[in-house]
């Protein structure tokens, strides 16, 4: 792809395009194409191997065909056709191999999604703030859980248990200098010094998370949106996506990053300092060390209060572009936690004659407390979401407004499985025979043991959905035959089309699946916590002496759960390694990030970066500068996730510019996924306001598409936006134009359908090069009143 040369002094701030006619004159028409999940190449989007980059960089850029590079200077050549441009943003989610590391941040991404799943509410500002607070606190517990798991592995299993056991240290010679027996009482063999040295691992993990968060923010989210004032006539209550500061969360991310970094360092300090302080409290211990232990624990408690207080503060100034930064807080809070960690390491490393390592460190209480707090936060979040949903219930809102709590529960479960799996695998590796070490905390074994029952529920649910899909596919066969009267029937082709439609309908069952899995996870997690706290033994040991069936089930669940966690850990590492080396696999993982990282990091600063904080300002700047410099017509054409970016960018335009833009979406999840799961931002009121604000909006969808669907606006707005479902396949049998069987396209290749070119032509015909007269706020356009197509 050839890079266009700089046109300094000639582009007028249009992002590389030579200005053509001024506003009010006949302008060139522009079609701005935005691709969807998985990404593509400029050549594929523009259907031409010769493309040039008009504006942008290697991460995200706008491309044209080479012959269209100077289209603005030749408007007479484009009177009957638009200038196609392609905005390529796939490198934001599937770029170099380091993106494979983002798999480790999956629980953080999921809990961040829960923040944006808040139900629609009017006049409940305090309840809305409480919802955000509960999600931020849940995200904080996930950070503590991750660091605590690293402490469990490095400090407890390796430095405390294995290095303190002669047989285990002999099996792993690299631990010889930490073993009192192998090193003959060497300097590092003292328990406190072993703990202090092992603390480098979780501390380094915390530092890595801090670095990745800072680096990714600078690379992706530091792009400032267009600075504009809020229009007083604009109803900002329908969606926050039209607020100038929505896509610039620097202040909040920086504050949360400081709080979570401090929380991680404090967790490491507690893992090292608390065992030493407990030993110093024993009768006959040194009074000075005892006093220092109390002081350090008091400092840890004060640091914890400070971290929670910072997390509880509101931090999104969306009504303006907030360029401020809490510099003192951002710098001093992590620094204070680091200083406290260093002092704790010095305190733990002090010589303590008679201190030996036996058993396991007090990890059961730590992981039990984290699990209990997470469960209580999820329950409180569910109560808050229910209260919000009752104020303005939506018929299609996922799980009746409880989508956020359900997803937050899954994030906690995912974090628990990942951290517990690492601890279990390391314990098995260190102690192959199971005779040397006490192993990880009992709670982690209980949590692993509830995985098989959860899988049984999931399998039963999948079987039920499969049966329902099969029945729906049989019913669809008659509908397919009715749509093609007079054609020779082909039972196999009819069955394939009907099956594709039935499989596409599984997307609408997503809320049911998430609800059942979340409730089951909550109940099984509570049972595991109760079992661990009441018995203080692994499930198989706790069931010994009961009925043989119970004991056998407990043994099977414990063994199978440990095996499944090990298998999952191996698959996770293998998937990440493959994604690091294989670009195609990395692009597959990028599809997950395309959906999960659309939203800003408002609940967890260590989540993967929000690509929309780069993509939405890019599109907004391009559309605003084009319409201002040329006065031309503009259709933004978005496929799949690209339609979500297109809608978000249109909302960010000034109202006057928004009325000069037409929107064409196809295969769009705007209502089917975003409208149901994120009702506060993409609900019917929000999408209805977008329809009224842009000049025109048309949406294409297929019954065989598992992702895209109709926008479903109420009243007359519905048919004005949604076209009837497109035929898929284009022809049932063989025709003169299609002598070979036409494929079932599903979610792909919407531009191959003649309806696409027809709708684009009608949108361009409707648009005028001059600025339309402003409509009164809240007043919908009367179809056909201004000479445009009567159905738009």
Image (cartoon, grey):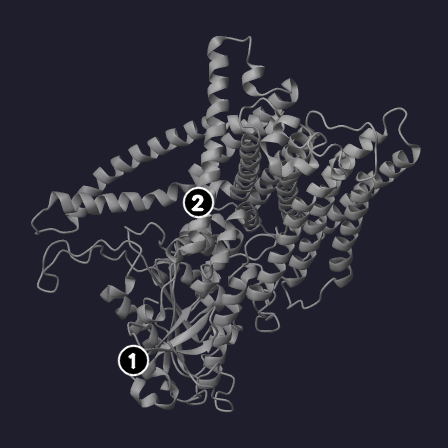
- Find residue 151 and report its horizontal and vertical position in percent: 66, 39
Residue at 53% of width from left, 35% of height from top? 421
Judge left or right: residue 93 versus residue 50.
Answer: right
Count neighbours of disc 1 (C-alpha within 10 A) and say few if under 14, some if 14 to 19, many if 20 or more: few
- Find residue 94 and report its horizontal and vertical position in percent: 44, 59
Residue at 47% of width from left, 46% of height from top? 397
Q: Is residue 636 above or below residue 82?
A: above
Judge left or right: residue 294 versus residue 656.
Answer: right
Q: Which of 311 and 552 is in front in this view?
A: 552
Secondary structure, mark 2, is: helix
Q: In this view, does 613 lie above or below 285?
A: below
Sooner in the amino-acid sequence: mark 2 or mark 1: 1
Quarter location, residue 254: bottom right
Q: In this view, does 351 lie above or below 655?
A: above
Residue at 43% of width from left, 63% of height from top? 90
User: Which labelled disc corresponds to residue 210?
Assistant: none
Kindly indicate whether the residue at mark 1 contacts the one at mark 2 (C-beta within 8 angstroms). Answer: no
Mark 1 highlights which residue? 81
- Find residue 528 and report its horizontal and vertical position in percent: 57, 25
Judge left or right: residue 582 versus residue 725.
Answer: right
Q: In this view, does 746 lie above or below 226?
A: above
Judge left or right: residue 103 versus residue 329.
Answer: left
Secondary structure, mark 1, is: loop
Q: Is residue 350 visible?
A: yes
Mark 2 or mark 1, whichever is nearer to me: 2
Give the quadrant of the N terminus.
bottom left
Mark 2 highlights which residue? 574
Give the quadrant of the C terminus.
bottom left
């Amino acid at each position: 792809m050839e890079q266009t040369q700089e046109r300094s002094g000639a582009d007028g701030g249009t992002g590389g395009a030579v200005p053509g006619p001024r506003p009010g004159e006949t302008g060139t028409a522009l079609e701005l194409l935005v691709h969807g999940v998985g990404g593509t190449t400029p050549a594929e989007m523009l259907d031409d191997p010769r493309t040039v980059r008009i504006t942008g960089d290697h991460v995200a850029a706008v491309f044209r065909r080479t012959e269209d590079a100077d289209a603005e200077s030749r408007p007479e050549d484009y009177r009957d056709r638009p200038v196609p441009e392609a905005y390529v943003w796939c490198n934001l989610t599937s770029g170099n191999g380091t993106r494979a590391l983002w798999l480790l941040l999956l629980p953080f991404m999921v809990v961040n999604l829960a923040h944006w799943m808040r139900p629609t509410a009017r006049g409940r500002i305090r309840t809305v703030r409480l919802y955000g607070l509960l999600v931020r606190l849940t995200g904080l517990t996930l950070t503590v859980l991750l660091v605590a798991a690293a402490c469990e592995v490095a400090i407890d299993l390796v430095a405390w248990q294995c290095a303190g056991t002669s047989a285990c240290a002999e099996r792993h010679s690299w631990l010889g200098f930490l073993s009192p027996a192998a090193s003959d009482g060497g300097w590092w063999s003292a328990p406190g010094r072993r703990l202090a040295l092992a603390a480098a691992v979780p501390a380094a993990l915390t530092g890595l998370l801090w670095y990745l968060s800072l680096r990714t923010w600078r690379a992706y989210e530091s792009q400032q949106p267009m600075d504009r004032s809020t229009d007083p006539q604009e109803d900002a209550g329908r969606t926050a996506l039209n607020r100038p500061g929505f896509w610039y969360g620097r202040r909040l991310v920086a504050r949360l990053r400081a709080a979570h970094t401090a929380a991680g360092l404090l967790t490491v300090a507690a893992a090292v300092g608390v065992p030493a302080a407990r030993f110093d409290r024993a009768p006959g211990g040194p009074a000075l060390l005892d006093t220092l232990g109390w002081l350090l624990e008091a400092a840890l408690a004060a640091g914890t209060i400070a971290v929670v207080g910072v997390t509880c503060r509101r931090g999104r100034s969306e009504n303006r572009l907030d360029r401020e930064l809490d510099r003192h807080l951002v710098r001093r809070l992590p620094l204070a936690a680091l200083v406290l960690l260093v002092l704790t390491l010095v305190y733990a490393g002090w010589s303590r004659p008679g201190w030996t390592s036996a058993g396991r460190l007090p990890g059961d209480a730590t992981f039990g407390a984290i699990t209990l707090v997470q469960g209580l936060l999820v329950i409180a979040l569910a109560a808050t979401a229910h209260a919000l949903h009752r104020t303005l219930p939506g018929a299609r809102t996922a799980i009746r407004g409880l989508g956020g709590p359900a997803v937050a529960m899954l994030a906690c479960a995912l974090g628990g499985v990942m951290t517990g799996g690492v601890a279990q695998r390391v314990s098995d590796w260190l102690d192959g025979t199971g005779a040397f070490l006490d192993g990880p905390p009992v709670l982690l074994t209980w949590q692993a043991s509830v995985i098989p029952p959860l899988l049984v529920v999931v399998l039963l649910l999948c079987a039920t959905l499969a049966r329902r899909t099969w029945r729906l596919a049989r019913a669809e066969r008659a509908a397919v035959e009715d749509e093609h009267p007079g054609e020779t029937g082909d039972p196999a082709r009819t069955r394939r089309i009907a099956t594709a439609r039935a499989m596409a309908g599984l997307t609408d069952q997503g809320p049911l699946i998430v609800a059942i899995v979340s409730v089951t996870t909550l109940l099984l997690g509570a049972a595991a916590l109760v079992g661990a706290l009441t018995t203080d033994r692994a499930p198989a040991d706790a069931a010994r002496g009961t009925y043989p069936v119970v004991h056998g089930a407990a043994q099977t669940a414990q063994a199978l759960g440990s095996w499944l966690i090990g298998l999952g850990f191996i698959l996770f590492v293998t998937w990440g390694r493959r994604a690091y080396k294989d670009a195609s696999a990395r692009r597959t993982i990028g599809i997950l990030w395309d959906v999960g990282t659309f939203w800003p990091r408002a609940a967890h600063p260590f989540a993967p970066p929000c690509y929309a904080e780069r993509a939405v300002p890019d599109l907004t700047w391009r559309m605003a500068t084009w319409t201002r410099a040329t006065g031309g017509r503009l259709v933004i054409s978005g496929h799949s996730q690209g339609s979500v970016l297109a809608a978000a960018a249109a909302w960010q335009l000034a109202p006057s510019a928004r009325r000069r833009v037409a929107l064409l979406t196809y295969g769009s999840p705007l209502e089917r996924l975003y409208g149901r799961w994120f009702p506060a931002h993409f609900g019917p009121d929000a999408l209805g306001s977008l329809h009224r604000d842009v000049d025109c909006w048309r949406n294409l969808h297929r019954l065989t598409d598992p992702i895209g669907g109709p926008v479903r606006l109420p009243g007359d707005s519905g048919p004005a936006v949604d076209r009837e479902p497109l035929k898929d396949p284009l022809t049932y049998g063989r025709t003169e134009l299609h002598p070979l069987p036409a494929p079932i396209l599903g979610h792909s290749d919407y531009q191959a359908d003649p309806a696409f070119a027809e709708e684009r032509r009608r949108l361009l015909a409707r648009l005028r090069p001059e600025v339309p007269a402003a409509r009164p706020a809240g007043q919908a356009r009367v179809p056909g009143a201004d000479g445009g197509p009567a159905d738009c």
